Amino acid sequence: MPSGRRHDQITWFLLPVIGASSFYLTKQWNIVVAISLSFLFSGFMFGPDLDIKSVQYARWGILRWIWNPYQRSMRHRSFISHGPLIGTLVRLWYLLNVLVICFIVVALSYSLVHKITWDLSKILQSSFDFLAHKHLWELIASLVGLELGSMSHSVSDWLGSSLKKINSPKKKKKQSR
């Protein structure tokens, strides 16, 4: 299993490949930027190792506490945290829930202090409309970049573990008489 530093090197190594491939396939710079930035975010801060106290976890700085419930509910390298698609979707769902809860707390606090009302459903609906209708392809590209960053991490873990198994000296079993 590669170290956090090795995962970072893999992310930097793959970035030009991801960027060039996405430009070759789409010929659209907005898509290239969305995939590349989300790939970097996933590789450095949003990858599968958020299920343990890792380099990715530490990079969240004073906000790393938001990942503590996630860590308590995940077994390291489980299919739910490291699996294709599911790992990224679970982390994304978790983070979006944390952000919505924080937004609600801040909005309610602000509205109590300043005596204003918010229509949360309208705010969420307009945000969704903005993303889904005006920037759908950038949203999809960002999701692809998040998954590519996650998979570069998981695949390197799987390859590293497999190579260790292949290269480790086999212990001889004691023969019973």
Image (tube, helix red, strand yellow):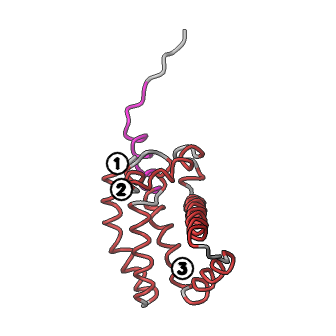
- Discs 2, 1 touching: Cβ within 8 Å: yes
Pointer 1 or 3: first along the chain: 1
* Element type at mark 2: helix
* Residue 157 among those drawn in magenta: yes
Q: Quadrant of residue 99?
A: bottom right
In the image: residue 67, left or right of residue 118: left
Q: Amino acid at mark 3?
A: Leu
Camera-side residue: 73 or 115?
Answer: 115
Disc ID at residue 139 = 3
Q: Amino acid at mark 1?
A: Ser
Local packing at callout 3 (Cα closer than 10 Å; few below 14, some 14-19, many 20+) is some
Q: Quadrant of residue 73?
A: top right
Pointer 2 or 3: first along the chain: 2
Q: Position of residue 63 (x, y in %)?
A: 44, 56
Please tell me which residue is depicted at 46% across the width and 60% down the height of the picture.
46
Furthest residue in direction top, as rendered:
177
Q: Position of residue 32 (x, y in %)?
A: 41, 82
Q: Position of residue 112 (x, y in %)?
A: 61, 67
Q: Mark 2 sits on what residue?
A: 7
Disc ID at residue 3 = 1
Q: CA distance from mark 2 to mark 3?
A: 25 Å
